[in-house]
Amino acid sequence: MRGVVLGVVAGMVCLIGSPTMEARAQGQLLPGITVDAPKRAKRRVRVAVRRVTRTRTPVQAPTPLPAVPEQPRADVPLASASLLTAKQVLGRGAASLGDTLGTTPGVSATSFSPVASRPVIRGLGGFRVRTQENGIGSGDMANLGEDHAVTIDPLSAQNVEVIRGPGTLRFGSQATGGVVSASNNRIPTTIPKNGIAFEARGGLNSVSTGRDGAVQLDAGGSNVAIHADAYARQANDYRIPGGIQTNSSYRSDGHAVGGSYIFDRGFVGMSFQDTAMTYFIPGIDSARVKNHIDLRQQKWASRGEWRVGESGIDTVRYWLGYSDYKHNEINGVGAAALIGSRFKNQELESRVEVTQLPFATMLGELRGSGGVQWSRRNLSVAGATDPLLAPAQNANLAAFLFEELQVTRSLRTQAALRIEQTETDGTGARFPATFLPPPNQPTVFPVDRRFVPMSASAGLLYDLSHDIVARATLQHVERAPDPIELFYKGPHDTPRTFEIGDPTMTLEKANTVELGFKRARGDTRFELSIYHTRYQNFIFKNFTGVRCSESFASCGTPGATYDQIIYSQRDARFTGGEIQIEHDVARVWNGVFGVEAQYDIVHAIFLDGSFVPKIPPQRLGGGVYYRDASWTARVNLLHAFAQKNLGAFETPTPGYNLLNAEINHTTTLPNGDWPVTLTVGLKGENLLNDDIRFHQSYKKDEVLQPGRNVRLFASMKF
């Protein structure tokens, strides 16, 4: 038996010639949906001190049907959350968080390249979507441009969660669109059973002859736990209907080590990880010059928890992370390579949270948490001629508070408050009002800006009959402009844009009302959310229609190929919603047969009635599934409608049909004290081989998404 295990491990590693990791897959009732602010376990009250002591909720044994226990997000109040398990992430096989989540209701992707694809949540991306790993920001420069990759590889995640709504205030006011949170075991929180746990996983795909793989090892004893993992992936140019999308290949790899000291009431640990990527950028001009990005990041992190359980304090937690990031944007390969821009970012972030013990009040039981968050960034972008971004610094200090009051058995009220102080120092530029020369150079001057964003939210959660939870929330969020939006002033090589910031920008303010309904158990499970947001001073990339080359003096001249973009502010309104539903139709064979459906829409306009640019179209999808204790099968068709609501200088995008199918089998092999769990699956993507263009992609008129693809994937763990 051990020979079989070693053979499987060796096969996984040989897929790519370099090892990697991944985490334990957990079953889930409704893929992509978790329970929203669930009921807590009953407390017993000591009348003398009016303090409530919690009793631990026992872990429920799995049901005989495929079904799967709920996975609530009790620590994110007022949130609408979608969760992908490690097994689902492996099956999707995407090289980026954006493409991994791109078919989730309410979530799309920029898809600048297979590796550089950021999530777009409810039509919002960039600085309004926070990507984080184990509670700490990704520390990269992905929000500075759609061509930049998020340095969190899906292969390294045990699960990936999308958090929308007021619950995002816990992580920062920049996350007005939402938070994409990946979790893994790089800082161990427990010692594995039998002292050791191992997992290997990987896959092959036909559309780009791509291969990926990961290995993960956890071990420990006494009070010490250690972790090590590595991953790698590579692919050639992918196929599209009728040909090849040139200049779309990539290679990436990474490794990490970590360790924790685990004591009776908590743990404290730290980790180190190293990530490297080289990926090419598809597009007409980019392919002609072999444009590509070389990226490197090193990250240190620490995390700890102390379960106090007395003096009014339940738990104290902290997170700390430091990232050293850099990438070069390069034209040509080998001896002909020429660096166009050098991006650098050094970032330090920390957060401390204190959770209070619940206690009784005249209105009901009150529980909550509060904390402080601090971060500092030093970033710069050096160009071949003038710098796109002269060295800039950004520091942020925030305090936040969340409270929940259990008014009646069915009614809960929740509230959140966040106050920040943001300091931004850099070099601003003043251009002529027409954004055309003369003069041939802007006037530059030092800038020192201070902002005090204040955000708050409040809401009601009501438990209806049939396990339905209704949610109504109000939210006011203020966001300080990012240094990029203030200080950019030159050519950005890879997306071929000439970008101009505005150092006089003011706070962006958003008022949102949202209604939601969720049912996460039973034969019919669903989540529905509808929202309306009014923005004051909404910051956006304003295409002027002017073309530039690599200097401002070239703007407006014939033959220029860079689109001029001005970071601008206007009042706007966003209205939209998403729904996901599953219904178990009947028991078939050893499991359940069912049907599923989803729909999402975003309608975004400025107050003059013109459309906000780069908004994804509405989508409608549905399918059938089967699941039992060992088998899962699913066929799903997602239709994206044509996008004809166009911002300035946008072109319409035709609709498309994305047909996917997947089947996988999981079995456990007895092996004494080391039972081995094997999963093998096959997935077909874009089986209709349709022409797919994403309206939110800046190169959608030049670049098609991958054509028909068949992916074989497998995992083994013990």
Image: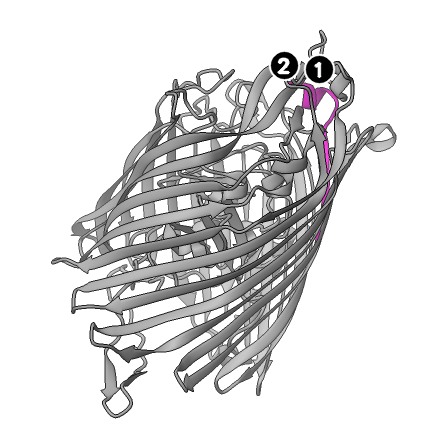
**Mark earlier in primary sequence (1, 2):** 2
Residue ID for mark 1: 555
* Residue plotted at (44% across, 68% down): 370
**Residue kind at label 1, given as amino acid type:** Cys
Seen in the picture, residue 8 relative to 306 is either above or below; the reply is above
Left/right of residue 33 with respect to residue 503 in the rendered view: left
Residue 348 occupies which quadrant of the picture? bottom right
- Residue 259 in the image, given as x and y percentages of width and height: 63, 74
Q: CA distance from mark 1 to mark 2?
A: 7 Å
* Residue plotted at (48% across, 84% down): 265
Q: Are marks 1 and 2 in contact (CB under 8 Å)?
A: yes
Q: Secondary structure at mark 2?
A: strand
Farthest residue to the right: give it: 335
Residue 220 occupies which quadrant of the picture? bottom right
Find out whether residue 287 is within the magenta segment: yes
What's the magenta region? Answer: 284-297
The figure's colour scheme reads one colour
Q: Secondary structure at mark 1?
A: loop
> How many numbered marks appear?
2
Left/right of residue 599 with respect to residue 682 in the rendered view: left
Residue ID for mark 2: 546
Farthest residue to the left: give it: 465
* Residue plotted at (53% across, 51% down): 452
Residue 247 visible in this rendered orientation of the protein: no
- Residue 242 in the image, given as x and y percentages of width and height: 53, 17
Q: Looking at the image, which is closer to me, 271 or 145?
A: 145
